[in-house]
Image: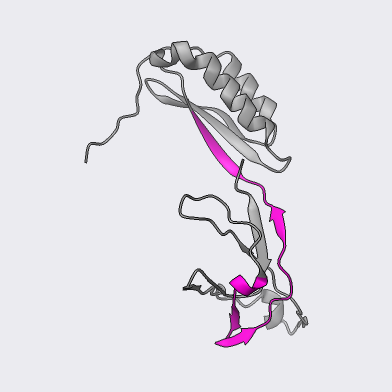
Amino acid sequence: MKARFLIALCAAILCAQERVAITPRARKEPALAAAGASLRLDVRMVQVPVTVTDLRGMPVLGLPASSFRVFEDESPRSIVAISVSEAPISAGIVFDTSRSMRPRMEHSREALEGFLKTSAPADEFFLVRFSDKPQLLTHFTRQPDDILSSLASVGAKGWTALKTSSA
């Protein structure tokens, strides 16, 4: 199961006894401001996407509002709402097509197909195969079939180019 859960909050968060401050980026003066144009907005709620995970990186769901504290300029603010939603992912798939994978190639393709079947419409993927050297097979796409068809004609050959470090 993919961890695609976001909790919308309001400005800075205190969770698990650690304070996390979200500092907005500095704004550049828009060209229209120099020309005398102005725009005023009253904002009643600000959404802050947050992902809460446990020590194993698994999503923590169902946290009550009391698990969080929100501050604006050191002043506490009330939490208006907490919601859980899915967010799209962008993932690169690196697929081993070296000769050592020959007995496992079909199983690996099936595993990848199973993973791609769980994707949401806005998810995007790219595919890199490697053996003696890496090769980009598919640029970012939202079509899982593009990934699978690119991999269908690839056979297991060559040596494994990835090396591990003993340090």
Outermost residue, left side:
167
- Quadrant housing residue 163: top left
Q: Residue at x 55, y 14 (%)?
A: 106
Residue 92 within the magenta-colored segment of the rendering: yes
Asked whether, in this view, residue 98 is left or right of residue 88, the answer is left
Magenta span covers which residues? 65-94
Residue 30: give x, y in percent of width and height. Answer: 66, 75
Q: Residue at x 60, y 83 (%)?
A: 72
Q: Quadrant of the N terminus?
A: top right
Q: Nearer the viewer, residue 62 or 129?
A: 62
Q: Residue at x 60, y 36 (%)?
A: 125
Q: Quadrant of the C terminus?
A: top left
Residue 2: give x, y in percent of width and height. Answer: 61, 43
Q: Nearer the viewer, residue 26 or 79?
A: 79
Q: For residue 156, say whether it is visible.
A: no
Residue 77 within the magenta-colored segment of the rendering: yes
Q: Nearer the viewer, residue 63 or 138?
A: 63
Residue 94: give x, y in percent of width and height. Answer: 48, 31
Q: Residue at x 78, y 82 (%)?
A: 42
- Quadrant housing residue 149: top right
- Quadrant housing residue 37: bottom right
Q: For residue 4, say whether it is visible.
A: yes
